[in-house]
Image (tube, helix red, strand yellow):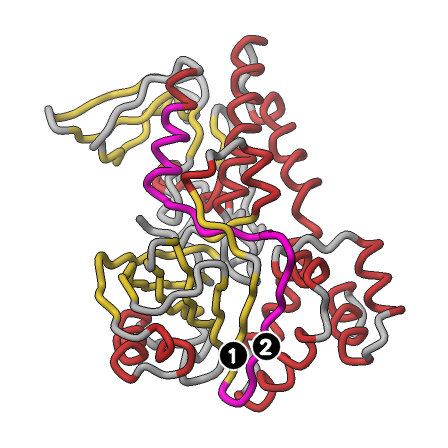
Amino acid sequence: VRTSGVTWIKNIKEFGIPNDCFNPIKNFSFCSPNNEVTISDSVPRAAVLDVRKSYRWLAEQAKESGADIFLKINVNEVIKNNAGDIVGVSGIGPNGKVTFHSKVVIDASGFPSTVSKAMGFVTQWKRFGAGAEYEAKAENVESDTWWLMVGQKYSPAGYAWIFPLGDNIVRIGVGVGKPESNVDPTQRLKELIDSKIGPIQKLGKITPIEFHYGLIPNDGLSRDTVFNNLILVGDSAGQANPLVLEGIRYAIKFGRVAGKVASDAIKSGKTDKDALYSYEENWRKTIESKINSAGKVQNRWIGLSDKEWDKELDIIKELNSEEFIDFIKAEFGLSNMVKLATHHPKLAVRQLFNLVKGKK
């Protein structure tokens, strides 16, 4: 497991993810060194996934559609034709070397971008988030409330979190922006749990069950995601929301688009970049402007001092639950933004959304 599993009820319904694969969230609590805010809703709009169960469900969906699934194979090489285009991959499995020949390869290898890197199309992400978390049993858990903790003591360039999974189990974690900070998230997480500061104290006795560590790109949508016979999707493509660095919904949504585009291209007999380009057009049209807007807010957040975070929470407090969810999800529809930037009764909120719109 390399993700904290945060996603949104709307997307869960869109994908058809079963109810036993997630814990619904309807209260969103923030704390900074000297401030605390909770935005409550009457119905859950966010969720924390049981990541393993969700992955198994996705695998079943793929299997039912006719996919063959191979486990425990470490793909480490690409196969090229005479023109230098990808025509397959190879790797090491439990029984030695395995080779897959393919008309189209979809690189969903996550942060390492194994396939596209081996092709020489991409280099290592320069900006990214490093996250460490414990899945733990806790004495006192509000199962419908998540916590985001901001300020220098939690993370010098990021935030800490408490995400409940139900049954008194929580994920307690720390995310740190790289290269903005050289703090080790694993060490900071241990310090926070040992010192029991802020909302962590309210959890009572904490008994770790397992440890997760992951990296997520935070370089914006800087990569081409289509090449001859190759499509990049999910973290390989940099498809992540920069505000809370979640992207599992993008991986599922655009993974399905990639599969459809690849299938149609193979049937047509053309799998070059032009034949696959409708994939890139689709995802860019859907999320590019939203991710770029969210990046502006993230750039503001990464530089905030503790005092400025205290004030930022006062701004967030003025959003109603629907506005807050659209904001934190990076679902900045232009009409919404214009409305918030011009008509919100609070000046600070208007200023924030003017920033998102692209004005100073």
Report whether 304 appears left or right of 229. Answer: right
User: In the figure, residue 260 lies in which quadrant?
Assistant: top right
Q: Along the polypeptide, which appears first: circle 2 or circle 1?
A: 1
Is residue 51 on the magenta stretch? yes
Instruction: Say if 140 sits above or below 287 in the image.
Output: below
Residue shown at 42%/36% (left/top)?
A: 108
Q: Secondary structure at mark 2?
A: strand
- Residue segment shown in magenta: 33-60
Residue shown at 46%/46% (left/top)?
A: 235
Residue shown at 45%/74% (left/top)?
A: 180
> Which residue is labeled 2 in the image?
37
Is residue 332 on the magenta stretch? no
User: In the figure, residue 168 lies in which quadrant?
Assistant: bottom left
Q: Amino acid at mark 1?
A: Cys
Task: Name the one closer to the observer, 241 or 4.
Answer: 4
Looking at the picture, how far across and down is residue 101, in whole percent?
33, 17
Looking at the picture, how far across and down is residue 225, in whole percent?
54, 38
Q: What number of labels is visible?
A: 2
As measured in the structure, the alpha-carbon distance from the residue carrying label 2 to the one carrying label 1 is: 6 Å
Assess disc 1: are there few (<14), some (14-19) or many (≥20) residues with their C-alpha within 10 Å of its C-alpha: many
Looking at the picture, how far across and down is residue 176, in whole percent?
41, 70
Assess disc 2: are there few (<14), some (14-19) or many (≥20) residues with their C-alpha within 10 Å of its C-alpha: some
Task: Name the one closer to the observer, 76 or 292.
Answer: 292
Q: Amino acid at mark 2?
A: Val
- Evaluate if marks 2 and 1 touch, with contact meaning CB atoms under 8 Å apart: yes
> Which residue is labeled 1 in the image?
31
